[in-house]
Image (cartoon, helix red, strand yellow):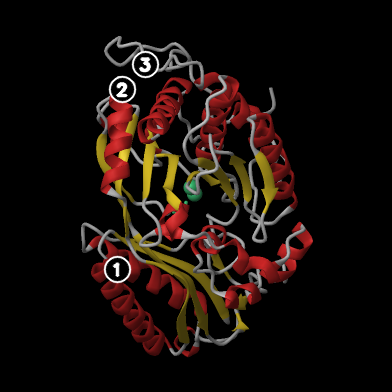
């Protein structure tokens, strides 16, 4: 077995197909879990990097994954197409020619060195649930669109959720000019992917024709594991401000410039990072992360003249988040002044906290109960495609228990037994709202 195939593998004794570890009630054995786990393994092998899973938006692996997912959609009785922004859209027609559509899905782009469940799980569960309906000849009084979004992680370009925003009708066309680290613009990347960005606005959905959007996703946190629950229903998703801090100092010789005479951009950035961490630690509902730092052109014998680091600030409270952004920007400026450098925080992505629809969430919870689980409600600290639909169409999310709360890490794992419960809940949800 390759290292890649081993990532996220079940450990001996862990819940698998047929597992009845939750009170012996018999859920977790609908027959979906192993099939979905096998498909996730297949999808995880489609990577831009050998030996680990990295599938960036509009990259070569994303293109291959989109084709693979489209083939699974067709096998599940759907028509499938790649839209103008790189989403794979599968459509399972309604029983009659009624105008309504229910959207399901998640994303197939990943972070670098990702786990195999983040995003892909929700796409594959949705396809398998539709496939089960198709195989049994079942149609619903609404069409189902399964969407495999392509731009959820925001690794390649400054803004993110482009795929979901195009459908929501809120895509800002200025984002087409964003340029990634490889020097390629979003517009150029779309064209290379085979998309026509000039048709992007045609992808916007008609809210009066859409019942809602429902997304299954690995929890990416420890709450369900702590409560010994295979699934949970999401109450709301934290708001996010993300951008780049650029610190400009003066490059100089590491051996000749006395310490008091330096304008060291990296030392200033280090002081900023500690101050940012302290600010986030001062409030219970606030997190701040610098996930990437670069010293462009840096060498061991040069005082750093330029540093860039990413900054991602989140909270369930928009007021809390915006206050933190303002305070952190002031702190960055103050540290820069005291160290004789300049610094600027440029925001590239901003999305407010988003609240899940009570009606759809209740239906999901009741569907999970039919599958033998009384799910708890929990907030999401992670961002999701669903948040782009806030105030456009109703949306709801189902979380699947995550081993150790570990995510954005190849060790990320959800058991086939828990995945089975999620698929049962989604399939029952479709029957309920039909
Ligand atoms: C996506 O995983 C995000 O929360 O940034
Ligand atoms: Mn995700
Ligand atoms: Mn993610």
* Gap in angstroms between the C-alphas marked 2 and 1: 38 Å
Residue 316 appears in which quarter of the rendering?
A: bottom left
The residue pinned by badge 1 equals: 321
Callout 2: SS: helix
Residue 195 appears in which quarter of the rendering?
A: bottom right
Q: Residue 10 vs residue 403: left or right?
A: right
- Looking at marks 2 and 3 on the same chain, the residue that comes earlier in the sequence is marked by 3
The image's mark for residue 204 is none
The image's mark for residue 370 is 2
Q: Is mark 2 within 8 Å of ligand 2?
A: no
Q: Is residue 319 above or below residue 353?
A: below
The residue pinned by badge 3 equals: 27
- Looking at marks 3 and 1 on the same chain, the residue that comes earlier in the sequence is marked by 3
Q: Tell me which residue sits at (29%, 78%) in the image.
A: 327
Q: Nearer the viewer, residue 41 or 273?
A: 41
- The percent position of residue 35, horizontal first and vertical second, equals 58, 21
* Gap in angstroms between the C-alphas marked 2 and 3: 10 Å
């Amino acid at each position: 077995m390759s290292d890649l195939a081993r990532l996220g593998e079940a450990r001996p004794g862990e819940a698998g197909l047929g597992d009845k570890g939750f009170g012996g009630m018999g859920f977790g054995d609908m027959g979906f879990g192993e099939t979905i786990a096998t498909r996730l393994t297949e999808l995880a092998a489609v990577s831009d990097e050998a030996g680990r899973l990295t599938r960036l938006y509009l990259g070569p692996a994303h293109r291959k994954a989109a084709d693979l997912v489209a083939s699974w959609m067709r096998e599940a009785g759907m028509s499938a197409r790649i839209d103008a922004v790189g989403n794979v859209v599968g459509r399972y027609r309604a029983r009659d020619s009624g105008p309504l559509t229910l959207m399901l899905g998640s994303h197939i782009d990943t972070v670098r060195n990702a786990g195999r469940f983040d995003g892909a799980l929700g796409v594959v569960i949705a396809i398998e649930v539709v496939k089960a309906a198709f195989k049994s000849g079942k149609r619903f009084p609404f069409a189902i669109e399964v969407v495999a979004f392509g731009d959820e992680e925001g690794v390649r370009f400054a803004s993110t959720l482009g795929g979901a925003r195009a459908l929501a009708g809120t895509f800002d066309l200025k984002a087409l000019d964003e340029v990634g680290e490889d020097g390629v613009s979003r517009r150029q990347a779309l064209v290379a992917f085979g998309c026509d960005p000039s048709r992007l606005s045609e992808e916007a959905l008609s809210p009066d024709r859409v019942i809602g959007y429902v997304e299954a996703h690995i929890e990416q946190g420890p709450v369900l594991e702590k409560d010994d629950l295979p699934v949970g229903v999401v109450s709301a998703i934290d708001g996010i401000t993300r951008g780049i801090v650029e610190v400009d100092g003066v490059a100089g010789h590491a051996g000749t410039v006395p310490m008091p005479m330096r304008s060291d951009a990296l030392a200033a950035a280090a002081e900023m990072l500690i101050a940012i961490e302290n600010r986030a630690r001062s409030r219970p509902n606030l997190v701040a992360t610098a996930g990437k730092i670069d010293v462009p052109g840096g060498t061991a014998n040069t005082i750093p003249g330029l540093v860039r680091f990413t900054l991602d600030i989140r909270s369930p409270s928009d007021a809390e988040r915006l206050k933190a952004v303002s305070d952190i920007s002031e702190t960055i400026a103050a540290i820069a002044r005291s160290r004789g450098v300049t610094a600027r925080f440029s925001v590239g992505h901003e999305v407010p906290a988003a609240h899940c629809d009570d009606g759809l969430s209740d239906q999901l919870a009741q569907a999970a109960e039919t599958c033998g689980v009384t799910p708890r409600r929990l907030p999401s600290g992670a961002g999701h495609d669903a948040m782009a639909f806030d105030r456009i169409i109703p949306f709801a999310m189902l979380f699947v228990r995550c081993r150790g709360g570990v995510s954005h890490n190849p060790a990320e794992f959800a058991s086939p037994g828990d995945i089975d419960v999620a698929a049962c809940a989604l399939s029952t949800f479709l029957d309920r709202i039909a």
